[in-house]
Structures are given as C-alpha cells and as structure tokens.
Amino acid sequence: MTHLLITTSRKPNQRTRSFAKDLASVLPDAFKINRGKKTLLELGLECFRHRSNYLFIIGERKGNPSIIRIYRLDKKAEYPLLKQILVFKISSVKLSREIHSSRIYGIDYMWINYDKCLTDNCFHIADLFIDIYRDRISKENYSIMLYLEEEDGVVFFKIYSRLGKICGPLFKINGVKKLDREV
C-alpha cells in the first residue's frame, strides 16, 4: 500500500523533478509518478490504482519548487475524487545533492517532532503527516524523524535519520492554506 503519491505540475524543470524524487525517497511508502499530460481526474485514478489516500503536486515558479498542493482521495464517490485540503508555499529549497545528505533505505517507522511549532500553520503540517502515516509512527522504533521547527512564521522542514544525520531535501514553508474543495 502506498500512503502518498508525489508528482509535479506539467512540464517541470529538472530542479522540481529532483525535489519530487528526493521527497519520495525519504518518506515511507511514498511513490513518485511522472505527470505527463494527466488531468486531476486521471491523477485521482492513479491514487486509486496505487491504493494511495494522498497526492502531493509540486508546482514551480521561475524554475524553483514553490508550492505543494495536497489532495485527499475520496473513495466513497462514484469515481475517485480528489479534494484539495492544504497548500504549502515553499521557499529556499535545498536538494539532497546540494547538501550531501545521507541516503536511507528500508524506512519502516517515522517519528514526527513538532515541539517547536508555535502557530496553526506548523500544526497543520504536523497533523497532515500524522494523518498520512498514522500506522507508521513510533517514537521508539523510528527510521527517520520529521522535524518541524518554526521561526518568525516560517516552518523549517527537515528529515533526520535515526543517527541524527540529515536525509532528504531541506525547505522552508512560508505559508499554509487550509482548504476542503472538490476538484
């Protein structure tokens, strides 16, 4: 079972494709798909086919990843229907290759550390990942730790291995917009 599908907007540049690949490589049960010309309806069918409940679509601005749109799959509808639930405005992306982060394989469990969250934006991010990985969270037996830290309204998104080394991309989330729309 895939918990999360990750794709990009149409015609992404190399940096956005690398960011999607980096994110999919460090999140448990995440799978990256190439978007091509797929519509949102077709992406909903992909989610259904992969038994995934969530879809991340990474958008870009001026050649850099700048937004992540998060959709939840409504399996009760006649056909797989995506509902947009959150939007992350991101900035200052550092890819794995740029920071020489560690590779990690065989991720079973994760821990989400949001002790340094101060505002609703940070808590919305933590709640999202808790919902996605509800059955994969363990404080004692984790392979990776998702660390959310907030400073001046900006949320720093970092992933650490059990040994305390950075793995995966680093990025800042400048804004979170909570939605619940059908698409």
Image (cartoon, grey):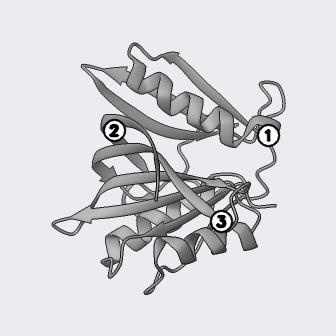
**Residue sitting nearer the eye, 57 or 38:** 38
Q: Residue at x 36, y 43 (%)?
A: 88
Dot label at residue 69: none
Q: How far apart are the alpha carbons under marks 3 and 1? A: 25 Å
Q: Badge 1 local density, few (<14 within 10 Å), some, or many (20+)?
A: some
Mark nearest the camera among 2 and 3 is 3
Q: Which residue is mark 3?
A: 80
Q: Secondary structure at mark 3?
A: loop
Answer with the quarter of the image where residue 120 lies: top left
Classify residue 164 as left or right of residue 143.
left
Total tally of numbered discs in the picture: 3
- Amino acid type of the residue that numbered disc 1 sits on in the rendered structure: Arg
**Residue sitting nearer the eye, 30 or 37:** 37
Dot label at residue 136: 1
Q: Mark 2 or 1 closer to N-term?
A: 1
Where is residue 53? Give x, y as percent: 68, 54
Q: Mark 2 or 3 closer to N-term?
A: 3
Q: Badge 2 local density, few (<14 within 10 Å), some, or many (20+)?
A: many
Quarter that holds the N terminus: bottom right
Q: Which residue is mark 2?
A: 173
Where is residue 106? Give x, y as percent: 79, 57
Classify residue 134 as left or right of residue 174.
right
Marks 3 & 1, CB-CB < 8 Å contact? no
Q: Residue at x 44, y 62 (%)?
A: 57
Where is residue 128? Give x, y as percent: 57, 36
Q: Is residue 133 above or below residue 34?
A: above
Q: How far apart are the alpha carbons under marks 2 and 1? A: 24 Å
Where is residue 157? Give x, y as percent: 44, 37
Q: Is residue 49 above or below residue 4?
A: below
